[in-house]
Amino acid sequence: MTEQLCTFFIEDVLFGVSVTKIQEVIRFQETTPVPLSSHHIRGLINLRGQIVTAVDLRSCLDFPMRDASDLPMNIVIRTDDGPMSLLIDKIGDVVEVDDDQFEQAPERLRGRARELILGAYKLESRLLHVLDVDRAVMFAGEVEE
């Protein structure tokens, strides 16, 4: 069985999310900060009149913060609680993968990334890490004491 994944980059690492979870991909949007929220929440964006929470995947996956001049893109995903935006560095292509190519999360993954990556597909030139969107969104909303 095959599945289509929307791919994106954080630094030079390739990630993917099932296209069935994607509502749309949009350019950078200004965010409005949310006081007392998790540090993974970058703020709220206005998506044609709908207020959407923007989650910084760099922060969730323990990547260094992006330079202020590097504007992120938004992948708006569908969740049970409504749309959420995942802030990414760069959008990739939609790729089709076969279930038999799927492997468990690579051993080299450490920390939070290991918890948020379902596994990986070996593509011709690189690994495609599959993000557990539901877990990432749940994790992003947790406020540390």
Image (spheres, grey):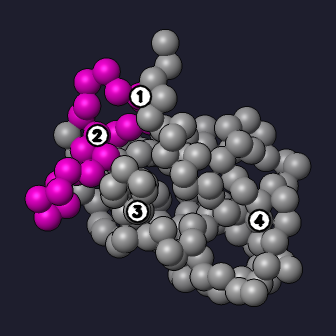
Gap between marks 1 and 2, in whole Å?
10 Å
Does residue 1 appear to the left or right of 25 in the view shown? right
Q: Is residue 64 magenta?
A: no
Sequence-wise, the earlier of marks 4 and 3 is 3
- Disc 4 element: strand
Quarter-of-image position of residue 114? top right
Gap between marks 3 and 2, in whole Å?
17 Å
Magenta extent: 33-53
Image coordinates for residue 144, horizontal then vertical, percent: 50, 19
Q: Residue at x 78, y 40 (%)?
A: 110
Numbered disc in front, either 3 or 1: 3
Sequence-wise, the earlier of marks 4 and 2 is 2
The residue at which mark 4 appears reads as 120
Gap between marks 4 and 2, in whole Å?
30 Å
The residue at which mark 1 appears reads as 38
Q: Residues within 10 Å of mark 4 (few under 14, many from 20)?
A: many
The residue at which mark 3 appears reads as 78
Does residue 46 appear to the left or right of 57 in the view shown? left
Sequence-wise, the earlier of marks 1 and 2 is 1
- Disc 3 element: strand
Sequence-wise, the earlier of marks 4 and 1 is 1
Q: Residues within 10 Å of mark 1 (few under 14, many from 20)?
A: some
Does residue 84 appear to the left or right of 50 in the view shown? right
Kindly give the residue lying farthest to the left in the view shown: 49
Image coordinates for residue 67, horizontal then vertical, percent: 42, 44
The answer to whether residue 138 is above or below residue 145 is below
Gap between marks 3 and 1, in whole Å?
20 Å
The residue at which mark 2 appears reads as 43
- Disc 2 element: strand
Amino acid type of the residue tagged 2 in the rendering: Gly
